[in-house]
Image (cartoon, rainbow, N blue to C red):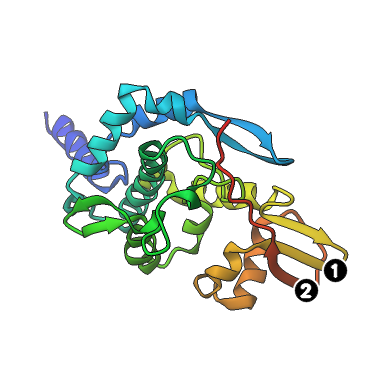
């Protein structure tokens, strides 16, 4: 009896220390199913990327239910940094899809809105963190968490944007997912990274958000960590950015 009691206590202690126990994220299984059905690899404008079937998502009631779940989720339950990162990356990507569907059909996300109020200025989420636009989610919520790899995870529904991943981001494996996403983005020539002699041309993302990577030296460190071994001496953040919709 004493042995059984000690064994039970050890199980409880181990479980309490396990990172998977007490997780407070939403159940992303429905999102996983939708991504597997409506996101597929392809090529558009000679650039390899994950293509999104927006019309299919728009007609699937499971997508509306998923957006509702995100909009009604109590973000006060997100206790760890990884949980907040995963939730808001997923929320950004889902609500970007919703924005496209709200204005369907569109050829580019930049066609939405007007000179005074663009697509990233529309309130898409209201919760304990405020009335959030897509810009708010990226700049007020995600960027202050100090994780530069968010910039290869959030998807702006455009060809040159880092791909919409074919699985949800989850706190328990977020570090691996972000590493994998960085490698995939930099492997896409003409989109993430192109090498010309000793010059590495990279996405404009590394210029727009260079400070998050630690400036030019930090961008170089990032490239050498996540890109295939390449020999370069110069970096330019000037790859042409294609804003056409990433639809199939």
What secondary structure is found at the residue carrying circle 2? strand
Residue projecting furthest to the front: 115
Residue at image x 57%, y 34%?
51
Q: Which residue is mark 2?
A: 234
Closest to the observer, 222 or 30: 30
* Furthest residue toward left: 1
On screen, residue 80 above or below 94: below
Extreme right residue here?
A: 197
Q: Earlier in the sequence, mark 1 or mark 2?
A: 1
The answer to which quarter of the image holds residue 40 is top right
Give the numbered dot on residue 5: none
Question: Marks 2 and 1: in contact by CB < 8 Å?
Answer: yes
Instruction: Give the left or right position of residue 58, taking residue 190 as reference.
Output: left
Tell me residue 77's x, y (percent): 18, 50
Q: Please state the horizontal and vertical placement of residue 233, each as a whole percent of the image.
A: 80, 73
Mark 1 lies on residue? 198
Would residue 22 be seen by someone viewing this image from the given angle?
no
* Image position of 217 (left or right of 104): right
């Amino acid at each position: 009896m004493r042995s059984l009691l000690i064994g039970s206590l050890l199980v409880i202690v181990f479980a309490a220390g396990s990172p998977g126990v007490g997780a407070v994220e939403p159940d992303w299984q429905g999102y996983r199913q939708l991504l597997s059905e409506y996101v597929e690899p392809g090529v558009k404008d000679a650039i390899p990327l994950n293509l999104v079937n927006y019309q299919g998502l728009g007609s699937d009631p499971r997508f509306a239910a998923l957006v509702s779940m995100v909009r009604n989720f109590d973000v006060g339950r997100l206790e760890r940094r990884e949980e907040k990162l995963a939730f808001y990356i997923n929320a950004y990507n889902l609500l970007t899809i919703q924005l496209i569907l709200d204005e369907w059909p569109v050829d580019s996300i930049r066609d939405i809105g007007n000179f005074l109020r663009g697509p990233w200025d529309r309130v898409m989420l209201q919760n304990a963190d405020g009335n959030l636009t897509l810009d708010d989610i990226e700049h007020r919520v995600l960027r202050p968490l100090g994780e530069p790899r968010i910039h290869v995870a959030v998807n702006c529904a455009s060809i040159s944007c880092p791909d919409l991943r074919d699985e949800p981001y989850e706190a328990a494996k977020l570090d691996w997912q972000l590493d994998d996403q960085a490698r995939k983005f930099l492997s896409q020539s003409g989109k993430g990274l192109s090498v010309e002699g000793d010059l590495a041309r990279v996405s404009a993302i590394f210029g727009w958000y260079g400070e998050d990577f630690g400036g030019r030296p930090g961008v170089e460190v990032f490239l050498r960590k996540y890109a295939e071994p390449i020999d370069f001496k110069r970096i330019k953040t000037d790859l042409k950015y294609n804003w056409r919709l990433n639809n199939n």
